[in-house]
Amino acid sequence: MGGASGNMNRAALCGRRRWRPLLAVVLTAALAGFVPSIGAAHVGAARQSIRAQVNQVDGAYHRAVARRDLNAVMALYAPNGNLVASGAPPVHGRAAIRRFLAPVFTAGWCGFTFTPSAVSASGSLVAAFGHYVSLNCVRGRVFPDPKKVAVLLFTHRPGGGLQLAYDIFIS
């Protein structure tokens, strides 16, 4: 009798185990009605919002360079921001970035645009990959220097928006 009872318990347990995956699916479906989910529209809107924020920083950078306003450019960098330019050692921190960019401003740098081809976000980090055009103005003439590759890494500002954490451009 003990053997038969043991077989019956195993059969009952095996039957319950077969229902566990189905039970998990049913519970997940039931909870989905109560827990808001991130649909494709929300994901698309989030990507568009991040891209808009990247474009906002680019626009501010462009306007600041056009005005030759180094202070406005510096305000776009995180306090511990980094600038990595081909042919130069990496620069860390706003003060060092200012020292790096000041001679570029006085040499005639008068414009800058960044066109992202890919933008993605993961946690608090936003990455943008694309091309930039730098403009040099000498004696009233503008000389574009196009098709350079840039990778920008942003962090979120405490008050909202993005700030440059890594500005990596390759000439």
Image (spheres, grey):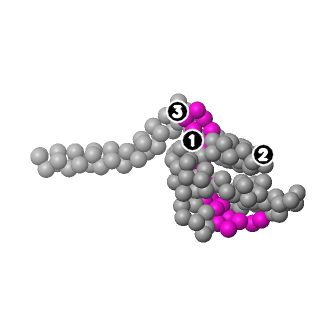
Residue matched to label 2: 67
Nearer to us in this view, 124 or 89: 89
Image quarter hosting the C terminus: bottom right
Query: Counting other residues with Cα less than 10 Å from the Cα at mark 3, is it few (<14), some (14-19), or many (20 or more)?
Result: few
In this picture, which residue range is highlighted in magenta? 145-171
Q: Amino acid at mark 3?
A: Val
Q: Residue sitting at 53 percent across and 44 percent down?
A: 79
Q: Is residue 114 visible in this depiction of the protein?
A: no
Is 66 covered by the magenta stretch?
no
Residue 108, above or below 70: below
Nearer to us in this view, 92 or 47: 92
Nearer to us in this view, 68 or 53: 68
Q: Is label 3 in a helix, a strand or a loop? A: loop
Whichever of callouts 2 and 1 sits on the residue coming sooner in the sequence is: 2
What is the C-alpha distance between the residues marked 1 and 3? 27 Å
Specify whether 101 is left or right of 138.
Answer: left
Specify whether 36 is left or right of 116.
Answer: left
Q: Amino acid at mark 1?
A: His
Q: Where is residue 114? Give x, y as percent.
A: 72, 55
Whichever of callouts 3 and 2 sits on the residue coming sooner in the sequence is: 3
Q: Where is residue 143? Give x, y as percent.
A: 83, 63
Residue matched to label 3: 35
